Image: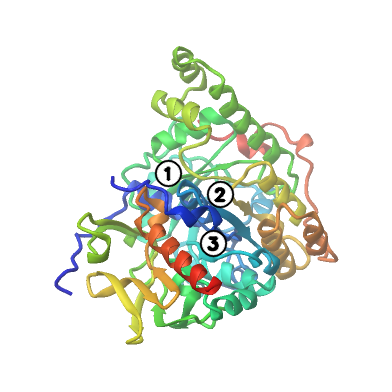
Amino acid sequence: MEDTSWSERQKSTWRTKVGLAEMLKGGVIMDVINAEQAVIAAEAGAQAVMALERVPADIRAQGGVARMSDPKLIQEIQDAVSIPVMAKCRIGHFVEAQILEALNVDFIDESEVLTPADDRYHVEKQSFKVPFVCGCRDLGEALRRIGEGAAMIRTKGEAGTGDVVEAVRHLRELGGGIRRLQGLRREELMTAAKELGAPYELVLEVAATGKLPVPNFSAGGVATPADAALMMQLGAEAVFVGSGIFKSDNPARRARAVVDAVAHYKDPAKLAEISYDIGEPMVGISTAGLVGEDRLAVRGW
Amino acid sequence: MKQDTPTPASSATQLIGVVSYQGDFQRHIAMLSGLGVATREVRSSEDLVGVHGVVLPGGESTTIGMLMERFGVAEALKKRAGEGMPVFGTCAGVILLAEEILNSTQPRLGLLPVSVERNAYGRQTESFEAQLNSPIFGSAALEGVFIRAPRIRKWSSEVDVLAHFEQDPILIRYGSILGATFHPELTQDTRIHRYFLDMVKIAHESQRG
């Protein structure tokens, strides 16, 4: 092999971080609370799992402070499945993020579903080796997180409700924000950046390309195969499903149906087949009745 | 960089199917479209009718393999590949093409006489980039982007190794099957895709006789 040579490995580059997000497109990432659930998710065709102590519906019901999972739980899940394992840290809790990096999780979700540890600042994510995903409700929030180093964005929705309306609202808001930028003249973009509270360079990039510089997934309230396909048709590049799977009456069946629905999101005949007789969905809470602290999506600065 | 010349005259008649359940299939489609080739997203066996070559993208091999079996694409694709249609897999695509996957019983096509180990460099923090030299692609190095990449641990003597990284083959060809354990589709370098399109062109012409 004298003709062949290669350079040293360069790890944790921006391209490897966004690259993993690219690999996760077009599928379903499922919340799991133990190894047994992780195996059910993987066997149904989940392309990654999110390890957490309680699913959002239970966090909502039980209240209290929601924190990063016990490392034991994360390791058990890592040992049980071969697909990527993500885990959540609290907003601004960079030590939880350091611990998750030491555990070698594949993605860290700095998540509003957990109780924020900092009411002004998010984690500075550039300096971590592990890529981050963060939630957003609109374009400004998305670009602030990307500016901090997030390699994937997910619209927040309202986790643990089984009500898809907030997920739809946030994805439409994000898409609308991008389209508005595309309609502006170049000299108008600095003021747009100021109004969005977003880095100017990223505003320029989005105005030119018409899309976020990182993949954009959807989360928060997806409970049925039709919900998942709705988010995909609205432009999400993959779907996170939290309480929707394991709070339904037949998780294995529903997990598979949601995976199949994302794979065939543009095919109504297939979606009808996929949705047929899959058992009761999670009960759900209408987000219209949620006020103040009960709205998790408002967390994020 | 040195590419972006659309492939030869036959490109107008080439139709490449890209298995589009999960993973970075849009990146392959974008790269092939940039080369002036028609593409089709493959989600069912009917989608394979009339395509001249197929790409298996990067992504999660378990998810893609399961969906290919559930929706009849695996069987139809094996049949077409058996008739000589070229197939190109990157990363997860190589795993799906392999005959043997270490420590796994997951669905696969078994079209490449190799044994692969999944996530063989480690978890995401071990993902990396490296420059790769391969004599058949000229003097400019290929950009290797390896994401939770597999390693080819054993391979038949009939497999051509087109490029190495450290001790491992990372770009291989076995007849009409091409496999890369990395992701050329995440770069702007189109040389490997053009190499595949040449394979497709030759296979297509020989079939037309």
Contact flag, marks 2 and 3 (Cβ < 8 Å): no
Residue A262 x %, y %? 67, 56
| Residue drawn 62% across the image and 37% down it | A297
* Residue drawn at the location 37% of the way across and 56% of the way down: A101
Q: Secondary structure at mark 1?
A: loop
Q: Nearer the viewer, residue B205 or B186?
A: B205
What kind of residue is marked 2?
Answer: Ala
Q: Chain of mark 3?
A: A
Subunit of label 2: A
| Residue B56 left/right relative to A98 | right
Above or below: residue A274 compared with residue A229? below
Q: CA distance from mark 1 to mark 2?
A: 12 Å
Verify CB contact (< 8 Å) between mark 3 and mark 1. Answer: no
Residue that carries the numbered disc 1 in the rendered image = A93
Q: Nearer the viewer, residue A134 or B71?
A: B71
Q: How is the image coloured?
A: rainbow
Q: Is residue B22 left or right of residue B130?
A: right
Q: Relative to A61, is A105 above or below? A: below
Name the amino acid type tagged 1.
His
Q: Residues within 10 Å of mark 2 (few under 14, many from 20)?
A: many
Q: Secondary structure at mark 3?
A: strand
Q: Who comes first in sequence, dot 3 or dot 1?
A: 3
Q: CA distance from mark 3 to mark 1?
A: 23 Å
Dot 2 falls on a residue whose secondary structure is loop
User: Disc 3 residue type?
Assistant: Ala
Pair 3/1: label in front? 3
Q: Which residue is mark 3?
A: A48
Q: Residue A218 in the image: state x and y as whole percent.
A: 61, 46
Q: Earlier in the sequence, mark 2 or mark 3?
A: 3
Is residue B37 visible in the rendered image? The answer is: yes
User: In the depicted view, which residue is nearer to us: A268 or B33?
Assistant: B33
Would residue A25 be seen by someone viewing this image from the given angle?
no
